Image (cartoon, rainbow, N blue to C red):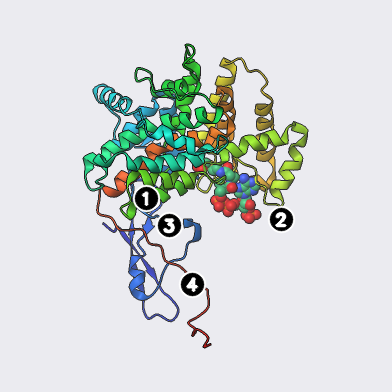
């Protein structure tokens, strides 16, 4: 399998250590450093900046060129010509479905949308002002208490059923979080609706009247789901893989992913962007915030800017910006003040040496909040929407991990604490 070899010399060690080098279908070659352990050496890479932690066939990113592919298909084409459930099928199966396979898949997912009725009682244990991500972490982990019939992680069919359940139930739980926070009754899913329409129905319908889902909003919602579906080995996906490597059940693993996503450096950024735009408040205040972002002594960062992998533009942000313009135009929201601030901020930042030199561009979260706000979704729900969309990525990676021989994830460390010492005698 090794096409090439790397040779390493280390001061104090005789001779060369030969390391296999592997090539993927795209992207940089990887050096297999496992032989180093036998030589009493570890590699050191805090933040996994240069470490390929696994082999994967699902998603490819070229950060330099701003390319994102799922199953080889570019994200722009998927966002404009596919839909979320088709992308789910692609991530789970590696190929786009035929029309018959698509119909069957949509049917199966639609038939798993209800959650066990007991789940609704859990919500009463939370304060009404609880952050919905706190509720999601708890409720998704708790799903493992309900579906004992599909928890054998070594059974491919069980893994498949878990994937269907998770894709289907995330919108239901997400909408329940919102309804609980505003004191409205939970709305049951409607299986004749599309995935995005059903989510909007559960969010905004009430038992008191008819609610017609706007096709414009459903399309925008579906695009947001597609754009967040997967992003290879990011912090939350790596968390899911690591949790899964111990043999933990899939619902617990996805709950771990939700927890990792919550932080503002990751999925929490979409909420943080809107909070930041509201705090800026006026175009005149932008320079002050730009200066703060550049000040090394100020922890403030421009939320929605920068990415570990994208050192050119984030291709998802391009589609998101275009969608944002379309949605606001279709909704007749002319001159949205936050959009104006966002566009000006982007323009100023992209011309500023600090951002140019560090290759800091708007990421997927920069414009998504403005669309979500226009749809009527409250800020605190933004990261929940990200979690809902990313569930397919998490479960596909988890399934991929368990579909081939694997090992528990166990990083090593560079220890810099006290050396061996005896406990003081008393
Ligand atoms: N505003 C100001 N400065 C920044 C920013 C920012 N948003 N992002 C990075 N920098 C600076 C950083 O201070 C550092 O400067 P210096 O070299 O002078 O020390 C340099 O750019 C490199 O940054 P880094 O922290 O080493 O980069 P990283 O790859 O570790 O972090 C990041 C990536 C996304 C965590 C970071 O850019 C960030 O915090 N961005 C804001 C939060 C955000 O929008 N997150 C969403 C990411 S996309 C959605 C997702 O997939 O989760």
- Circles 1 and 3, Cβ within 8 Å, touching? The answer is no
Q: Which residue is mark 3?
A: 51
Query: Spatial distance from mark 4 to mark 3, Cα to Cα?
Result: 19 Å
Q: Kindly state the secondary structure of the residue where label 3 is placed.
A: loop
Image quadrant in which the N terminus is located: bottom left
Query: Spatial distance from mark 1 to mark 4, Cα to Cα?
Result: 25 Å
Residue occupying the point 46% across, 49% down: 235
Q: Residues within 10 Å of mark 2 (few under 14, many from 20)?
A: few
Query: Spatial distance from mark 2 to mark 3, Cα to Cα?
Result: 29 Å
Q: Earlier in the sequence, mark 2 or mark 3?
A: 3
Q: Give the image location of residue 395, x and y in percent.
A: 35, 41
Q: Which residue is mark 4?
A: 415
Q: Residue 297 — which label?
A: 2
Q: Quadrant of residue 405?
A: bottom left
Using the image as rendered, state which of residue 206 and residue 33 is in the foreground.
206
Would residue 66 be visible to someone looking at this image? Answer: no
Using the image as rendered, state which of residue 254 and residue 177 is in the foreground.
177
- Circles 2 and 3, Cβ within 8 Å, touching? The answer is no
Q: Earlier in the sequence, mark 4 or mark 3?
A: 3
Q: Earlier in the sequence, mark 1 or mark 2?
A: 1
Q: Nearer the viewer, mark 1 or mark 2?
A: 1
């Amino acid at each position: 399998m090794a096409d090439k070899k790397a040779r390493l010399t280390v001061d104090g060690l005789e001779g060369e250590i030969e390391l296999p080098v592997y090539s993927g279908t795209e992207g940089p070659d990887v050096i297999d450093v496992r032989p180093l352990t036998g030589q009493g050496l570890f590699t050191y890479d805090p933040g996994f900046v240069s470490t390929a932690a696994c082999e994967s066939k699902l998603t490819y990113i070229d950060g330099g060129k701003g390319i994102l592919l799922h199953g080889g298909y570019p994200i722009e084409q998927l966002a404009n010509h596919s839909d979320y459930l088709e992308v789910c099928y692609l991530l789970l199966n590696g190929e786009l479905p035929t029309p018959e396979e698509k119909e069957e898949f949509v049917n199966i997912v639609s038939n798993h949308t209800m959650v066990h009725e007991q789940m609704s009682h859990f919500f009463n244990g939370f304060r009404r002002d609880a952050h919905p991500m706190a509720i999601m972490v708890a409720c998704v982990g708790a799903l493992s208490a309900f579906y004992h019939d599909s928890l054998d992680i070594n059974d491919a069919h069980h893994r498949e059923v878990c994937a269907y359940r998770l894709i289907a139930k995330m919108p239901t739980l997400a909408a329940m979080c919102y309804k609980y926070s505003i004191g409205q009754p939970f709305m049951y899913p409607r299986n004749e609706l599309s995935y995005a329409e059903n989510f909007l129905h559960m969010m905004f319908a009430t038992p008191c009247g008819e609610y017609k889902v706007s096709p414009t909003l459903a399309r925008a919602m579906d695009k947001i789901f597609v754009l967040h579906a997967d992003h290879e080995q990011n912090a939350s996906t790596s968390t899911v893989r690591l949790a899964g490597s111990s043999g933990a059940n899939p619902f617990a693993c996805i709950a771990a992913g939700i927890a990792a996503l919550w932080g503002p450096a990751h999925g929490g950024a979409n909420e943080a962007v809107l909070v930041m735009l509201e705090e800026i408040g006026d175009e005149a205040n932008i320079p002050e915030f730009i200066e703060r972002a550049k000040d090394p002594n100020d922890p403030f960062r421009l939320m929605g800017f920068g990415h570990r992998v994208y050192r050119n533009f984030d291709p998802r942000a391009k589609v998101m910006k275009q969608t944002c313009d379309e949605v606001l135009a279709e909704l007749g929201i002319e001159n949205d003040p936050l959009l104006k601030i966002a566009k000006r901020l982007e323009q100023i930042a992209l011309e500023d040496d600090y951002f140019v030199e560090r290759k800091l561009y708007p990421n997927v979260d920069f414009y998504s909040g403005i669309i979500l706000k226009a749809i009527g979704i409250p800020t605190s729900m933004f990261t929940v929407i990200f979690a809902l969309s990313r569930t397919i990525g998490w479960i596909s990676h988890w399934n991929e991990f368990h579909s081939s021989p694997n090992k528990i994830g166990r990083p090593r460390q560079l220890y810099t604490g006290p050396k061996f010492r005896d406990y003081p005698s008393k």
